């Protein structure tokens, strides 16, 4: 029996983005307390060609699609959330995104590649296997330290609460989608009814989800370690260049692994998911009912759009 359509999401400023195969929706709470929503077509590049839907290729494209959509929606949420007198601070968002991208490359690609040989020398280990393992270990430490640091920031707390709301509402959809579909067709439910139902059910769901982007980051670290076991050029500059060049491959492989592991049961798969789920505990917070309402509104509008209600 077919499962529910697979929807993903992202927390933004005072809101949540939901993404489906053909559309994306965003709902944001404005300064006046009203929910402002936006729906757009968001066909992925992989839908345009069978070649682009091949395993690994589709994962790399999905990563790029998610990144570009996420930046666009983040900017839109800032437009809605910032009061008029704070618009000047939003003008720095473009620069902030660029700086964040540079810092991410520096922290997660360049720094581990540079630091790993020194750590390996201090530990007195040699060989390709150990060198790659040390670099992966450094990358994990950087990732955990980074996530732990930003999760403590007061300004980030509400985003983490919306992140939790996103997960809880997606769980509510996945656990009750047959009932929702029946109500849509039999009782003529629309966005208000779907949203109210999802918000009420989401209160009892987990704030952790196996398809979360936080888990994806940890899987990238593991996949990167395996890939770099076979590609180990000499010299720091060559290693950094190789790792940057292989980002699409590692992103594609990580996507396939995440997609496969999210639906697998058993101790082995739970063990593989455990580090990413643990990391999620740092990037999510229990949301308030008003935040669940925003996330539910976004997903309800996505459901309506995907079934043809959006024009």
Image (cartoon, grey):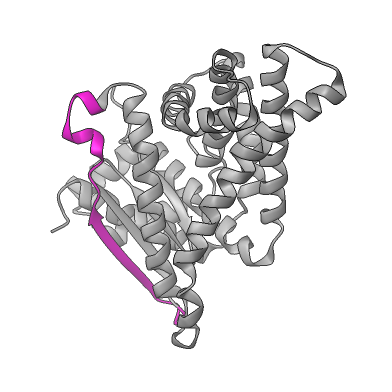
Where residue 282 appears, x then y in whole percent? 67, 46
> In the picture, residue 120 is in which quadrant?
top right
Residue 87 shows up from this direction: yes
Q: Residue at x 64, y 44 (%)?
A: 107
> In the picture, residue 135 is in which quadrant?
top right
Total of numbered circles in the picture?
0
Taking the magenta stretch, the answer to whether it contains residue 114 is no
- Residue extending furthest bottom? 85
- Above or below residue 127? Residue 66 is below
Q: Residue at x 24, y 33 (%)?
A: 46
Q: Residue at x 73, y 15 (%)?
A: 130
Where residue 149 appears, x then y in whole percent? 72, 53
Residue 288 falls left or right of residue 257: right
Where residue 93 appears, x then y in whole percent? 47, 68
**Quadrant where the image shows the N terminus:** top left
- Above or below residue 169? Residue 190 is below
Residue 207 shows up from this direction: no
- Above or below residue 206? Residue 220 is above
- Read off the magenta span: 31-52
> In the picture, residue 248 is in which quadrant?
top left
**Quadrant where the image shows the C terminus:** bottom left
197 and 164: which one is in front? Answer: 164
Where residue 173 appears, x then y in whole percent? 38, 43
Residue 173 falls left or right of residue 257: left
């Amino acid at each position: 029996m077919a499962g529910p359509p697979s929807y993903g999401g992202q927390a933004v400023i005072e809101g949540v983005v939901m993404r489906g195969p053909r559309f994306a929706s965003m709902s944001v709470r404005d300064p006046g307390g009203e929910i402002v929503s936006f729906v757009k077509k968001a066909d992925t590049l992989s839908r345009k060609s069978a070649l682009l839907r091949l395993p690994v290729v589709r994962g790399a494209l999905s990563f790029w699609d998610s990144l570009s959509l996420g930046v666009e929606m983040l900017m839109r949420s800032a437009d809605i959330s910032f009061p008029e007198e704070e618009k000047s601070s939003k003008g720095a968002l473009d620069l902030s995104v660029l700086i964040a991208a540079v810092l991410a490359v520096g922290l997660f690609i360049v720094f581990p590649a540079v630091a790993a040989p020194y750590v390996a020398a201090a530990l007195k280990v040699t060989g390709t296997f150990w060198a790659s393992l040390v670099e992966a270990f450094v990358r994990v430490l950087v990732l955990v330290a980074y996530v732990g640091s930003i999760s403590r920031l007061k300004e980030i707390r509400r985003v983490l609460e919306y992140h939790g709301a996103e997960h809880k509402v997606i769980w509510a959809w996945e656990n009750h989608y047959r009932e929702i579909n029946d109500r849509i067709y039999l009782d003529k439910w629309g966005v208000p009814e779907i949203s109210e139902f999802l918000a009420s059910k989401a209160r009892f769901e987990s704030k952790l989800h196996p398809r979360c982007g936080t888990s994806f980051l940890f899987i990238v670290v593991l996949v990167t370690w395996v890939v770099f076991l076979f590609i180990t050029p000499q010299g720091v500059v060559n290693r950094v260049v190789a790792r940057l060049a292989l980002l699409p491959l590692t992103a594609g492989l990580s996507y396939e692994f995440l997609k496969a592991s999210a639906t697998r049961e058993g101790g082995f798969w739970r063990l593989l998911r455990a580090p990413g789920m643990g990391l999620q505990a740092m990037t999510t917070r229990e949301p308030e009912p008003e935040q669940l309402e925003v996330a539910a509104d976004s997903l309800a509008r996505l459901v309506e759009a995907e079934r043809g209600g959006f024009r």
